[in-house]
Image (cartoon, grey):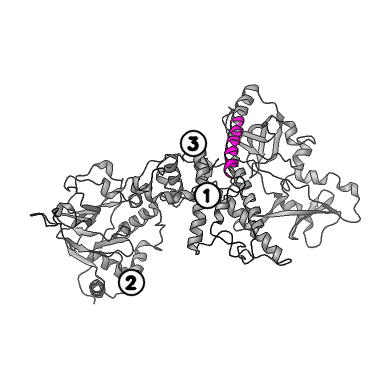
Amino acid sequence: MRHPKSRFPDYPPLRRAPDLAEGAVVGLSLRLARAGRHDPYNVFEVEGVEKWGRPARFRLSAVRVSDAPFDGVPAEETRDGALHVLFETDRGERFGVSRCRAATRPAPQEGVLLLDRLGRTWFCGERAGAGPLTGSERLRPVPDATAPLMRDTVLEGADLPDRLPALGRFRLGSQGEVIGIEGGLGPVGPDLLARVSARVEALVAREERIRRVAERHFGDGALDGLLLGRDLPITDGLIPAYHAFDARKAFDEALLKVTRGFLEELRADGLLAPCPNNGPRGVGPLEAWNRWIAGAYDAPPEARDREDRYGEYRLADSPGFKTVSNCLIRAVVEMERRVWERHHPGERYDSGSRDVPVERADVETSFRDACARIITAYAEEETTDNIGFMDLQGRQTSERFMLGESFLTPVLCAVPADYGSAPVPLPPIEAPRSIRHLELSLPSGTLVMADWFRIDGFNEGLRALLGGADDFEINYADGLDARARAYFEKAGLVIVQVGNTSPAAYADTPGVWRMGHVDEDHDAFWTEEGEPRPGVTAPEPVWRTCTDLWANTFADREVILDILMASEKYPDRVDALRAFEAYAEEYGVSATELGVDRLHLYVPTGHGVHAEDFNEIFRAAEIPPADWREDVYVLSASPLTVDPDLLAPCDWRERARVAPDPSPEP
């Protein structure tokens, strides 16, 4: 819940020509504003002037008025009745008034404006036309400042709070401020007012509870532990640089300890909530936040599962935790600038300057400022210092998200296209399935596999078949899927992301090649005395590949030659084959005669790559599981009996090949 402050500028000054009577311009400022020539911030757009493909915006610094045209500006653009009117910007540009229009005109919203018991203004409403108000609409605090235009026209010279509570149709600015009222103000029905007032009071009471906890944890001396091991004065920055590893680690751990103690009390008081709609979207810090809310990190590390042992490090980047460090960083940066300017009077500050001594008094001032910011940020659930929280990303897609409402009860929202609209919470989504089934033809019967084929012409040929750049967002699940599909459908090539694993192929199941790992030291193969168990041996791999690029890339040998030929670097397939064989011999590419003309592939989807759960969930009747082996993916000569619910829907179709003409070139 934010309580923003907003100050509207007065009307821009009028500069009338010396020979123009003062009476000729009476009421002109109000008339121009009413006509929508500029907005309440004195910002306007100019017809026909764009920047980056959008209407350019200008800030009005003065309105020039004359009874004669202005030099250099067409008279028809400045004419306003008997006068000529010119808008002058803060950069000296000049535009005729007829080309100018208000830059900010958000869609109207119907709602209620009212005051809380602390005298602050709130708005509860929806976009106009959404239906009758119920009191359950979006509720948010708004600045109580009043634009001159609104005060002079709608409010009859009064300030906005003096006319509340009120019902009406309002235009709200980017910070929630009321920048326009359409049709005047009306009374609020008692039932509607009671419902909205109850919601406001609940939020105010919540704010007071959070403030009391924050003040206990961030009083005098709360941040002194950040200085342990540091000598004063400090000349290399109050916050240690990352390359000063030991000092930065101690600093971050001390800050996290203070932050965690504070937030654990908020958690115990029921003032925090998990993110309800992250799930498979996979925003890592919010995953850690949800796990912490559930108590997963309360047990000692040795008592946790693998995910909770290694996932806790992301907790410090969750919005609920990071707000403390954001407030601290802002306070420290401002302090270090003041210190620098004190030592360099009259010089221009460089944001990278950290070579001045920071004394104890400076540190104490900075820490007091930081604590005040932290208390306010959490009590008001204010995100002013939280740069970056408007731009969250997960693993599933490259889509960017923002938080709606409070960072203590985070809800993922789509980023509005215009940044002025209210963020809309995203619906929860089901986890995509982790396994995909594909069929790959083997016209030659020889499967060739590497992490990548670094053969002259391979990249160029692949791009030619793709019809453009080989450019996919493979840090995200949907990007991995898009790349895999494009390779398969346009080039007949398979790529499976395998991480830092280098899986080997095991053929101990007839007609199946299990790509993964075998624990040769497992008790299944050795007695307690360290002797081999009779009749039991670990399977041997039939081929291995290095995966420096954390992937297996494979296809029939003829498909690799097709790709090389598409580069137009080889006069015929014989030359392409020579290039392939030379590369395979030098770099250890596997080329295995499988004796089949088709393979069934059971491979991880993009989601499965990130979940790393193929071995845990893939089951086929023909493949016996064993705790001494781990499968990364599976190849089979025949379809396997797999529960259809395990498989992601897939309509991919392998690129149809045209068999090369075996006749020699003339």
Which residue, given by chain and number where applicable, does mark 3 sit on?
A: 268
Magenta range: 200-222
Residue at the spot of label 1: 322
Q: How many marks?
A: 3
**What separation in Å lies between label 1 and label 2 (alpha carbons)?**
48 Å
* Labelled disc at residue 118: none
Q: Is residue 380 above or below residue 312?
A: above
Q: Which element is circle 1 on?
A: helix
Front-lying residue, 429 or 349: 349
Density class for disc 3 (Cα within 10 Å; few <14, some 14-19, many ≥20) is few
Q: Which residue is mark 2?
A: 457
Residue 475 lies, in percent from the top left, at 40, 56
Q: Toward the viewer: 545 or 654?
A: 545
What residue lies at 31% left-to-right and 47% top-to-bottom?
Answer: 434
Looking at the rendering, which quadrant does residue 641 occupy? top left
Is residue 260 or residue 94 the one in the foreground? 260
> Magenta region's main secondary structure?
helix
Mark 2 belongs to which amino acid?
Gly
47 or 610, nearer to the observer: 610
Nearer the camera: disc 3 or disc 2: 3
Q: Position of residue 79 (x, y in %)?
A: 80, 52
Task: For marks 1 and 3, give the one nearer the viewer.
Answer: 3
Query: At label 3, which amino acid type do we have?
Result: Ala
Q: Position of residue 616 (x, y in %)?
A: 27, 47
Point out the image quarter for the C terminus.
Answer: bottom left
- Callout in the foreground (1, 2): 1
Q: Secondary structure at mark 2?
A: loop
Residue contact between numbered discs 3 and 2, judged by CB atoms under 8 Å: no
Q: Amino acid at mark 1?
A: Lys
Image quadrant in which the N terminus is located = top right
For marks 1 and 2 on the same chain, the one whose residue lies earlier in the sequence: 1
